[in-house]
Image (cartoon, grey):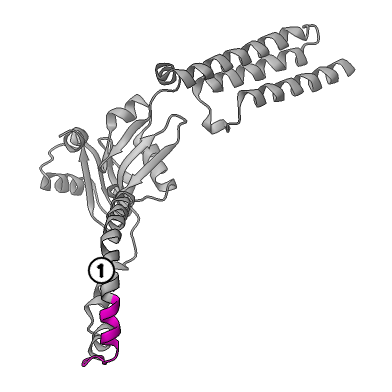
Amino acid sequence: MFIVLIRTIFLYALVILVMRLMGKRQIGELQPYEFVITIMISDLAALPMQDTRLPLILGIIPIVTLLFIKTVLTQLQLKSQAARKFLEGEPSILICKGKINFKALKSQQINLDELMEELRLAGYFDLNEIEYGILENNGQMSFLTYDASSESSSSKENQSQSSSSSGDSSQNSSSKTNSSSSPPANSGTSTINIQGSNSPNKTTSSSSNQRPRLPVIYVLDGHVNKNSLTTSGKNKYWIEAELKKHGINSIKDVLLYMTDTNGKIICQLYDDYEKGCFK
């Protein structure tokens, strides 16, 4: 019993040391070869603890060898892009301009339900909000929205315009001091128009503050979602009639048919990705 205790403490300390030398990474951020090495190290450390007949050196040598292999592969990744591409792979574009890349989903063995779940977990319920959806090498998904891309472009324009407007600010300040001495003639009209009951700003704000709806998927990967039809009080004939309105004769040709949070229809065929992203 005492020998088993000593072996357990020693192998535990060895595994902790090896994992520290391998680098600081979370389990979800491990590359495939790093994950394999981690599993092998745990198995090799467990064998001498379970069987006291095995010499302790039979567990130490393979663990140190795996640490050496991992160090060599890491150095190859740092110095060679080809080795990095071979060991880690490349990020895959799953969504481009609101269109789903079905071929990339098949190659990465990801179904549409998992993709929609990742979108919801990231806080995006409308597919039209996504400009790019990328599957990273560590298995996580990152999304770029249209709002984020437009804000970055507008910030660059504002920076370029601020330099040109700085020269005019000195001239405007002198004119403002001269005009401040005399009060405006119609100072109360703007206040009445903004706060009135018939203000157009209030109508637009009320229409824009409508409560969002939960997106409903009616067709997914060429199959009808019967639960969504039943919940919405519709049937298969309704979805077939809706598809015919868009010139679609078969449900098998539809990759996705759903309504977004605003009740708008999102319809994508299997070949729409190539048409939308590779024109």
Q: Amino acid at mark 1?
A: Asp
- Tell whether position 233 is magenta: no
The answer to if 174 sits in the magenta stretch is yes
Looking at the image, residue 279 lies above or below residue 214: above
Q: Which residues are magenta?
A: 173-187
Q: Residues within 10 Å of mark 1 (few under 14, many from 20)?
A: few
Q: Is residue 273 left or right of residue 53?
A: left
* 228 w.r.t. 25: above or below: below
**What residue is rendered at 52% in x and 18% in y?**
75
Of the 4 image quadrants, the one containing the N terminus is: top right
The x and y percentages for residue 50 are: 76, 15
Q: Label 1: which residue? A: 168
> Can residue 1 be seen at all in this image of the molecule?
no
Query: Closer to the camera, 256 or 195?
Result: 195
**Horizontal and vertical percent position of residue 178:** 27, 86
Residue 129 left/right relative to 69: left
Quarter of the image for residue 61 reads: top right
- Local secondary structure at mark 1: helix
Question: Measured from the top left, where is residue 32 in percent x and y?
Answer: 50, 22
Query: Which quadrant holds residue 171?
Result: bottom left
Count of residue discs: 1
Please, is residue 203 above or below residue 271 in the view? below
